[in-house]
Image (cartoon, rainbow, N blue to C red):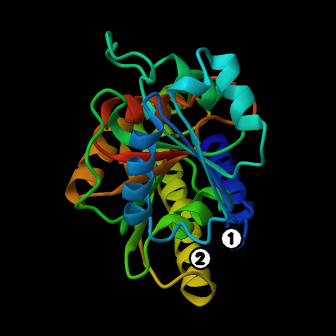
Amino acid sequence: MTSREEHIDEFESVFRRSTREPFVYADVPIESVALVTDGSVEEAERARESLINFLPALPPVSSWRLITGADYSNVGQLLERIDSQQTDLVLTYRHLQEQSLVPQHSLGVYLDVLTQVMTIPVLVLPGTSARPASLAERVCNRVMVVTDHISGDNRLINYGARMCAAGGTVWLSHVEDDAVFSRYMAAIERIPEIESDRARDLIAAQLNKEASDFVETCIGVLKDKGPHVSFQSSVTRGHHLREYRQLIDNHDVDLIIANTSNEDQLAMHGMTYSLSVEMIDVAMLLL
């Protein structure tokens, strides 16, 4: 056996040994909700009624808190308000207290900080604080979970199941980053002992298989134990933002769900940040 064949056999052996993390379904408790606006109490109350209609899967919520413009004047005060009571979910808008100047390609100072320092999920409502998009004609029955590493991400998937209205559809979508894949393959191609063409095919096939197998396992468990919604799989490789924009547009998605960061970083995940500043007409739950 040649040295190259031995190295390819090592690749295949590693892939065969790769452990499959089982999906564990768990109901997500959401009992206390805080709606953060920068307007009046009356405006916040109207927004709450609209959200109750948009999110029929949200009940039973035992506590709705309205945090309005008069309750805070800086990020520190807002964080104190939120932390003063048990909160399972924060709902808010982009560009709080920035009506006079709405910068492009940003979530606004308040939301940027909230998503970095809080562990509480934040549901970003469509539009901006100054120009909120109407939810009057929508019900959250088309939910898309988006990630570049879906295997083992039970929390993300369970939130997807939790937020979708009964009878709706949840897409479990995984897009392998083409740029990252190409960078790793460029490094492998510089190792003469490895047959790069075969390695490329093996790695691409294995990455696709791992994600697809995990999603199919999730769907099987969710159909048995989860809520009365449909689950669909979407596993592909390509440019993150372009692929997800196409998926979201094609399925007329009502709510996007994504992780804000990895365990070892504070700043928001690049893919999630790009989606959150580009897809401003779609509600987005940031975990």
Q: Mark 1 points at which residue?
A: 23
Q: In this view, does 28 lie to the left or right of 244?
A: right
Q: How many C-alpha atoms fall within 10 Å of the one at disc 1: few (<14), some, or many (≥20)?
A: many
Q: Where in the figure is residue 178, as x and y percent of width and height?
A: 40, 37
Give the quadrant of the C terminus. top right
For this rendering, which residue is in front, 261 or 178?
261
Which of the two discs, 1 and 2, labels the residue nearer the N terminus?
Answer: 1
Q: What element carries label 2?
A: helix
Q: Foreground: 106 or 189? A: 106
Q: Mark 2 points at which residue?
A: 217
Q: Is residue 118 visible?
A: no
User: Is residue 227 something that shows in the picture?
Assistant: yes
Question: Farthest residue toward the top?
Answer: 101
Name the residue rendered at 48%, 48% in the picture: 198
Residue nearer the viewer, 81 or 120? 81
Q: Which quadrant of the structure image shows residue 265?
A: top right
Tell me the distance, in whole angstroms, between the alpha carbons under discs 1 and 2.
7 Å
Nearest to the observer: residue 233 or residue 79: 79
Q: Position of residue 248 (x, y in %)?
A: 29, 52
Which mark is on residue 241? none
For the residues bearing labels 1 and 2, Cβ distance under 8 angstroms? yes
Mark 1 belongs to which amino acid? Phe
Vertical position of residue 82 compared to residue 222: above or below? above
Q: Please state which amino acid type lies under the numbered disc 2.
A: Thr
Instruction: Rate crowding at label 2 as few (under 14), some (14 to 19) or many (20 or more) other CA atoms within 10 Å.
Output: some
Q: Is residue 60 above or below residue 277?
A: below
Figure quadrant of residue 25? bottom right
Residue that protrudes farthest toward the front in the picture? 42
Q: Residue at x 62, y 28 (%)?
A: 114
**Image check: 51 left or right of 28?**
left
